[in-house]
Image (cartoon, helix red, strand yellow):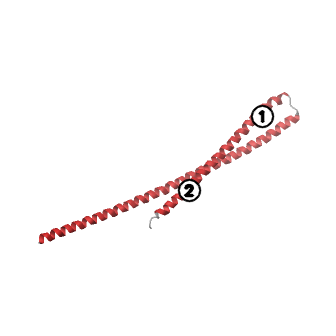
Amino acid sequence: MSPPDPRSLQTLLEREQHVRDAAARALQQAQAQQAQAKGQVDQLAAYRADYVDRWSLRLSQTATIEILQCYRSFMQRLDQALAQQKGLFGRAEATTVACRTALLDAERRVAAVQKLLERRAGEQRLVLQRSEQRQADESAQRMGWAASQLSSFTALH
């Protein structure tokens, strides 16, 4: 079996680098979405805490049933919004983890192809060195044979 053509390995390397770069961009986008979702969770939680603080004092002093019902209804909607946003954050976090894993896999593939290219280049250098050594040995052998022939010829005459 003949080794792969270096050009095809170079093409494979370029393709894997392209995949890696796309994975890096996807990770950046996922991290940005995760940060945005986290910011919204934090904002909603802070608003909820502020709302509870403001209304706790008012409700403890004077509160009609209608106001109390409005407060509870709004708190339920606020809690639902917070739970929904936490769910979005959880999904964004999972997407970030998946993108990070995909990027690491792509980086490993790029490194493997680069290592293969380096190994092939080393093998080619070794073949070239052996060929050059063989040629030098043959040349030396021919020169030695020619010298021995010349010395035999001069010894006879």
The one of 17 and 61 positioned closer to us in this rendering: 17
Are the residues flagged by discs 1 and 2 in contact, CB closer than 8 Å? no
Give the residue at the far left of this rendering: 157
Q: Quadrant of the N terminus?
A: bottom left
Does residue 143 appear to the left or right of 111 in the view shown? left
Asked if residue 130 lies left or right of residue 4, the reply is left
Q: Amino acid at mark 2?
A: His
Say if residue 96 shows up in the picture: no
User: How far is mark 1 from mark 2, CA to CA?
Assistant: 49 Å
Q: Which residue is mark 2?
A: 18
**Label 2 neighbour load within 10 Å: few <14, some 14-19, many 20+:** some
Q: Is residue 30 above or below residue 126?
A: above
Residue 130, quarter of picture: bottom left
The x and y percentages for residue 29 are: 63, 49
At numbered mark 1, what does the secondary structure look like: helix, strand or loop?
helix
Residue name at image x 62 percent, y 51 percent: 26
Residue 118 in the image, given as x and y percentages of width and height:
44, 56
Q: Determine whether the residue tagged by mark 2 lies in a helix, strand or loop.
A: helix
Q: Which residue is mark 1?
A: 51
Residue 81 seen by the camera: yes
Instruction: Give the amino acid type for the residue marked by disc 1 in the picture.
Output: Tyr
Q: Which residue does the image show at 15% across and 70% down from the upper left? A: 152
At label 1, counting other C-alpha atoms closer than 10 Å, the crowd grade (few under 14, some 14-19, many 20 or more) is some
Residue 94 horizontal side relative to residue 125, left or right: right
Left or right: residue 23 compared with residue 111: right
Provide residue 87's location: percent of width, then percent of height: 71, 46
* Mark 1 or 2, nearer chain start: 2
Q: Quadrant of the C terminus?
A: bottom left
- Of circles 1 and 2, the one toward us is 2
131 and 89: which is toward the camera: 131
Question: In the image, what residue occupies the spot 15% across and 71% down?
Answer: 153
Q: Position of residue 99 (x, y in %)?
A: 61, 51
